[in-house]
Image (cartoon, rainbow, N blue to C red):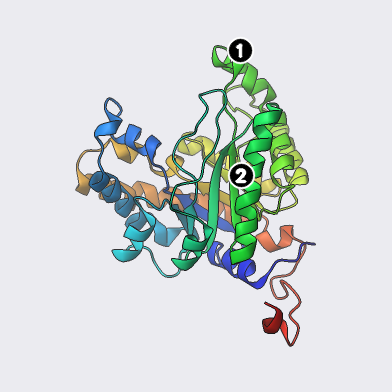
Amino acid sequence: MKNLSIGKLRGLQQIANNDGILTMCAMDHRGSLRGMINARNPEKVGYAQMVERKLELCSCLAEHASAVLLDPIFGAAQCISQGVLPKSTGLLVSIEASGYEGGDEQRLTTLLDDWGVEKIKRMGAAAVKILLYYRPDLKQLARKQLDTVNKVAWDCIKYDLPFLVEPKSYLVGNEINHPEELAERLGKLVIDTARDVTGLPVDVLKAEFPADMHYKKDKAELIELCRQLDRTSPVPWVLLSGGVDFETFCQQVEFACRAGASGFLGGRAVWQEVMRIGDARERVRYLSTVGVDRLKRLNEIAGKYATPWYKKLGVAAQKLTDVSQDWYANY
């Protein structure tokens, strides 16, 4: 049983649905979104075009998600200011700079300049998220990455906001030419990563699916890998989509939720095809039909199988923490 502060509890309530399930949609993409819009010349995708796409995503999908994840440059303030983020939908905001330092095999996460937990708190967001390229087998680099996570974690404690960490593995060494080698060790990497990251004061783990389904097909084995991930994480965890196709993500969400996940935080699996459409009206039509139907289907899967976030922490919905008569004096 983990005791959380009032602010963190309220934030978790705001990003979950009424049943305590996290059915969240990611829209915080920056560099990768430019590449989806214009694969040949992503650098030609300007500020106005990026904002336009974020507004379309949020206006069509946010009401069907328990929360949305937006970035501070193109999405979060813009979606609030233009009234497309419903008051009933929670808001997570990313804190990291886009991309990474150190080269493709030594990926170092950095925080966005002139941005931080205090500002995320002040703008009224419910939670903070960081993307972390992470290889537990690269010990020195892993320590630096965990130091960054720890710094943000303590800022989140100071400002009483839930902290969500999204570690992602990547190809190194021989894996670059032989991706099947990463696929073979992916389960162990994801589980070891979860152990490292949740050893810090974080509140939600946004985890990769612990297998590459191009190589592993057996349902029982896949669910068991998810169970190992669940046993490793002492905090609620949700599944990221990582750009897989929608049908694959549906399978992964079911397996993960059957094994103990508290839901999903998916982005590209829901909406990636729409970014290739040039006409804005067609994009909105697609998002309002196909995109909404996809989110609804994911919501149904999570609603049927997922573990409420508070149950994972060993508490009841009606008594998330003890509150003394003079709690406010020491808050």
Give the residue furthest to the bottom: 325
Q: Which mark is residue 213?
A: none
Residue in the foreground of this view, choosing between 331 and 250: 331
Is 79 displayed left or right of 122 in the figure? left
On screen, residue 182 versus residue 120, left or right, reads right
In this image, 87 relative to 182: left or right? left
Residue receiving disc 2: 148
Q: Nearer the viewer, mark 2 or mark 1?
A: 2
For image coordinates 46% across by 34% down, the residue present is 245
**Above or below, comparing residue 187 to residue 50 in the picture:** above
The span from disc 2 to disc 1 (Cα, nearest Å) is 28 Å
Q: Position of residue 97 (x, y in %)?
A: 46, 43
Q: Quadrant of the C terminus?
A: bottom right
In screen coordinates, is 194 left or right of 90?
Answer: right
Q: Quadrant of residue 141?
A: top right
Quadrant of the image occupied by residue 269: top left
Tell me where residue 29 appears, x and y as whole percent: 41, 43
**For numbered disc 1, what is the local secondary structure?**
helix
Residue denoted by label 1: 174
Crowd rating for badge 2 (residues with CA inside 10 Å; few <14, some 14–19, many 20+): some
- Amino acid type at circle 1 is Asn
Whether residue 206 can be seen here: no
Would you place residue 38 above or below residue 157 in this image?
A: above
* Residue lying farthest to the right in this orientation: 1
Instruction: Give whichever of 148, 297 is nearer the camera.
Output: 148
